[in-house]
Image (cartoon, rainbow, N blue to C red):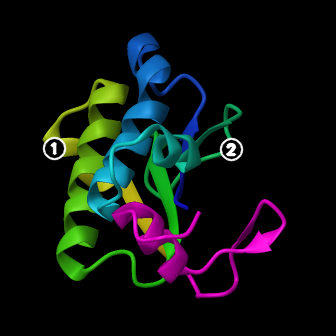
């Protein structure tokens, strides 16, 4: 089950961007992961917005806001093509949410973390990637 987290300095997103960015990032993640568009899978795509207090983010050069998108997916869920698409689309979502342009794209980092099979638990059970694939294709006894 995927998790996506956007870390941003407080106030760096537009009002509408702050309102929409979490669900939009969750939808992007599900699409690139190849999950079916069902209520079950949408409910499992968790999205967090972490806003840092003023002064908590800077670079050696300037104080322009930077954005970090951390994505956690089961190992094997993303091919190279899917990773590339996810990085590109998540970057665009963040730029829009912050009212920025393509020239600001290097201020958005997308870090993909693949959770090793057998190390993800939910509902009191270990969830394996094969279980998720079976759920997605309807090939399960559940």
Q: Is residue 58 above or below residue 80?
A: above
Tell me where residue 33 appears, x and y as whole percent. Answer: 34, 63
Q: Is residue 135 above or below residue 101?
A: below
Left or right relative to 41: residue 99: left
- Counting residues from the start of the chain, the first of labels 2 and 1 encountered is 2
Q: Which residue is mark 2?
A: 56
Magenta segment includes 135 = yes
Please, which residue is most extreme toward the right here? Answer: 124
- On-image quarter of the N terminus: bottom right
Number of numbered callouts drawn: 2
Tell me where residue 58 appears, x and y as whole percent. Answer: 56, 49
The residue segment tinted magenta is 114-142
* 10 Å crowding of disc 2: few (<14), some (14-19), many (20+): few
- The residue closer to the viewer here, 81 or 109, is 81
Quarter of the image for residue 51 reads top right
Magenta segment includes 134 = yes
Q: Residue at x 60, y 28 (%)?
A: 10
* 10 Å crowding of disc 1: few (<14), some (14-19), many (20+): few
Q: Residue at x 52, y 44 (%)?
A: 40
Q: Is residue 67 above or below residue 53?
A: below
Left or right relative to 107: residue 100: left
- The residue closer to the viewer here, 106 or 7, is 7
Q: Are marks 2 and 1 in contact (CB under 8 Å)?
A: no
Q: Residue at x 49, y 62 (%)?
A: 71
Q: Which residue is mark 1?
A: 103
Left or right relative to 53: residue 13: left
Please, which residue is most extreme toward the front here? Answer: 141
- On-image quarter of the C terminus: bottom right
Q: CA distance from mark 2 to mark 1?
A: 24 Å
Tell me where residue 32 appears, x and y as whole percent. Answer: 28, 59
Q: Secondary structure at mark 1?
A: helix
């Amino acid at each position: 089950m995927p998790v996506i987290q956007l870390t941003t300095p407080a106030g760096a997103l537009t009002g509408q961007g702050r309102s929409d960015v979490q669900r939009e990032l969750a939808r992007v993640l599900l699409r690139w992961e190849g999950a079916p568009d069902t209520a079950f899978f949408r409910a499992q795509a968790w999205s967090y917005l972490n806003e840092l207090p003023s002064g908590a983010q800077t670079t050696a050069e300037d104080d322009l806001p930077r954005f970090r998108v951390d994505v956690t997916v089961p190992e094997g869920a993303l091919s190279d093509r899917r990773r590339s698409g996810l990085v590109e689309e998540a970057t665009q979502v963040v730029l829009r949410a912050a009212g920025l342009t393509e020239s600001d794209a290097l201020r958005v980092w997308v870090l993909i973390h693949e959770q090793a099979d057998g190390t993800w638990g939910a509902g009191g059970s270990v969830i394996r990637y094969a279980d998720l694939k079976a759920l997605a294709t309807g090939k399960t006894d559940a």
